[in-house]
């Protein structure tokens, strides 16, 4: 696996979910065999503490699939009690047969281990709130992951700090483009697009530490402005 380390709250954060598990979770998964019900139980323990960490995994998948543009839309609909997170990429996509079983934890193209946890855990995190995870993919065109969650469900994990997730990815992959948009019921919308940012920065590279701090704080402020403390 690609061990990318991001800074979060002064600690290093790996993009690999497996490295964030406790030993008992790892043992549980190792013993799971092909049991998706065991994975379901693991998912319900909230080993991924917020949505921004699921976002990190989904975007890492996109980067691994060779995507050059990734678009994230995070929208609340209080009327329908729905939080929707949509991630679109222009990566290599998936074959329809693989797509059918992609949320099975034993579907992975990893060579380092036999389980791929990212999508299955995100699916579980959505379903326990009454929502779902839908994945559309066209080989050679790209993939769209749409997650919905019940906003008021007591089982919903918080959105977390999407600024840290995005700034970490942008500084690690300054040659790729990421765009994030927050939308709410009032029709308010704010976001950041690295294509615009690159133009504004001129010669200053996106990998610069000052840019990392600016992007992190800017996105987090927009998240707060539009979605509040969701
Ligand atoms: N955006 C994408 N484009 C193309 N293939 C994808 C994409 N997202 C996931 N995949 C495929 O689905 C597989 C399963 O993804 P998942 O995130 O569940 O596990 P993983 O990335 O293999 O491992 P982990 O998330 O535990 O690090 C990946 O190995 C990859 O082959
Ligand atoms: Mg993954």
Image (tube, rainbow, N blue to C red):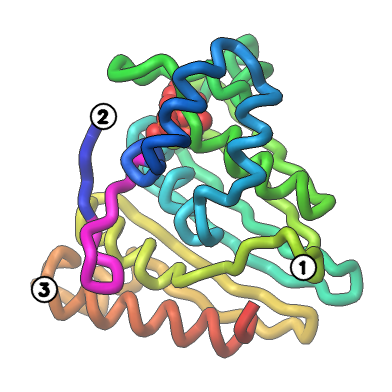
- Cα–Cα gap, marks 3 and 1: 39 Å
Quarter of the figure with residue 112: top left
Pinpoint residue 11: horizontal percent, then vertical percent: 23, 65
Quarter placement of the N terminus? top left
Quarter placement of the C terminus? bottom right
Q: Residues within 10 Å of mark 2 (few under 14, many from 20)?
A: few
- Cα–Cα gap, marks 1 and 2: 33 Å
Q: Residues within 10 Å of mark 1 (few under 14, many from 20)?
A: many
**Residue of label 3:** 204
**Residue of label 2:** 1
Pinpoint residue 194: horizontal percent, then vertical percent: 34, 66
Pinpoint residue 179: horizontal percent, then vertical percent: 45, 62
Q: What is the tally of numbered marks visible in this picture?
A: 3
Element carrying mark 2: loop
In the drawing, does residue 172 fall left or right of residue 47? left
Is residue 141 at least partly visible in the picture?
A: no
165 relative to 216, above or below = above
- Cα–Cα gap, marks 2 and 3: 30 Å
Helix, strand or loop for the magenta stretch, by majority: strand
Element carrying mark 3: loop
Task: Pick whichever of labels 2 and 3 is earlier in the sequence.
Answer: 2
Task: Pick whichever of labels 3 and 1 is earlier in the sequence.
Answer: 1
207 and 51: which one is in front? Answer: 51
At horizontal 23% and vertical 79% (from top left) the residue drawn is: 213
At horizontal 85% and vertical 69% (from top left) the residue drawn is: 81
**Residue of label 1:** 151
Q: Where ligand 2 lies, by quadrant?
A: top left
Task: Pick whichever of labels 1 and 2 is earlier in the sequence.
Answer: 2
Q: Which residues make up the magenta segment?
A: 6-16
């Amino acid at each position: 696996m690609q061990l990318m380390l991001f800074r979060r709250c002064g600690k290093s954060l790996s993009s690999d979910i497996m490295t964030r598990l406790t030993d008992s979770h790892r043992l549980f998964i190792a013993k799971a065999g092909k049991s998706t019900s065991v994975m379901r139980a693991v998912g319900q323990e909230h080993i991924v503490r917020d949505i921004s960490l699921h976002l990190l995994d989904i975007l890492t998948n996109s980067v691994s699939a060779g995507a050059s543009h990734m678009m994230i839309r995070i929208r609340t609909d209080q009327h329908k009690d729905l939080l929707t997170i949509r991630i679109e990429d222009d990566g290599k996509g998936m074959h329809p047969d693989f797509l059918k079983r992609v949320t099975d934890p034993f579907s992975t193209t990893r060579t380092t281990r036999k389980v791929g946890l990212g999508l299955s855990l995100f699916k579980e995190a959505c379903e326990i709130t009454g929502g779902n995870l839908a994945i559309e993919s066209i080989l050679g065109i790209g993939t769209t992951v749409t997650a919905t969650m019940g906003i008021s469900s007591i089982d919903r994990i918080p959105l977390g700090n999407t600024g840290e997730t995005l700034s970490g990815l942008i500084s690690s992959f300054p040659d790729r483009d990421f765009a994030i948009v927050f939308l709410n019921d009032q029709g308010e919308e704010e976001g950041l697009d690295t294509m615009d940012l690159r133009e504004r920065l001129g010669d200053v590279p996106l990998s610069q530490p000052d840019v990392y701090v600016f992007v992190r704080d800017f996105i987090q402020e927009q998240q707060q402005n539009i979605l509040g403390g969701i």
